[in-house]
Amino acid sequence: MTADERQFDIVGFGEVLVLDEGGQMNHQATLATTVVDPVGAGDAFAGSYLAARLSGFGPRSASWLGSAFAAAVVAAPGDTAGLPSPEQVVELLTQARQLEGSVS
């Protein structure tokens, strides 16, 4: 995979560089404020990022959503205990859609 084919690079714990539709690199800082257990963070990020992209979200809002899921996971012990509830997922999707609409 060449640099032109990548859409994001993980550059550190919770730090992601995202290539947007216009070819600009954007930094997505971690949204984690509490880290209890890092297990599952990468899976939570990747799964929600890919699901968002496959659902039509742009790279910037998909990376924000990935960071939000990863932040929830690391705030609890184990790899799934911190996953958002269905109600929280709806709220996160709403926030990501608002971010999507704010991209100029």
Image (cartoon, rainbow, N blue to C red):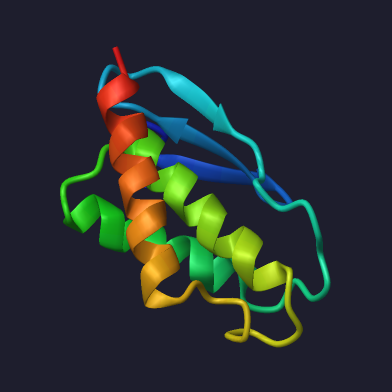
The foreground one among 65 and 92 is 92
Q: Is 104 situated above or below 68? A: above
x then y, percent, for residue 15 = 66, 43
With 31 as the anchor, is 97 left or right in this view? Answer: left
x then y, percent, for residue 96 = 36, 43
Dividing the picture into quadrants, the one containing residue 85 is bottom left
Q: Is 97 situated above or below 75? A: above
With 93 as the anchor, is 27 left or right in this view? Answer: right
Q: Is 50 situated above or below 38? A: above
User: How many marks overall?
Assistant: 0
Residue at image point 77% right, 51% down: 33
Dividing the picture into quadrants, the one containing residue 52 is bottom left
Residue 41 visible (yes or no): yes
The foreground one among 88 and 66 is 88
Residue at image point 46% right, 34% down: 18
The foreground one among 65 and 47 is 65
Quadrant of image for the C terminus: top left
View extreme (top): residue: 104
x then y, percent, for residue 43 = 52, 72
x then y, percent, for residue 2 = 38, 39
With 75 as the anchor, is 24 left or right in this view? Answer: left
Residue at image point 51% right, 69% down: 44
With 60 as the anchor, is 97 left or right in this view? Answer: left
Residue 47 visible (yes or no): no
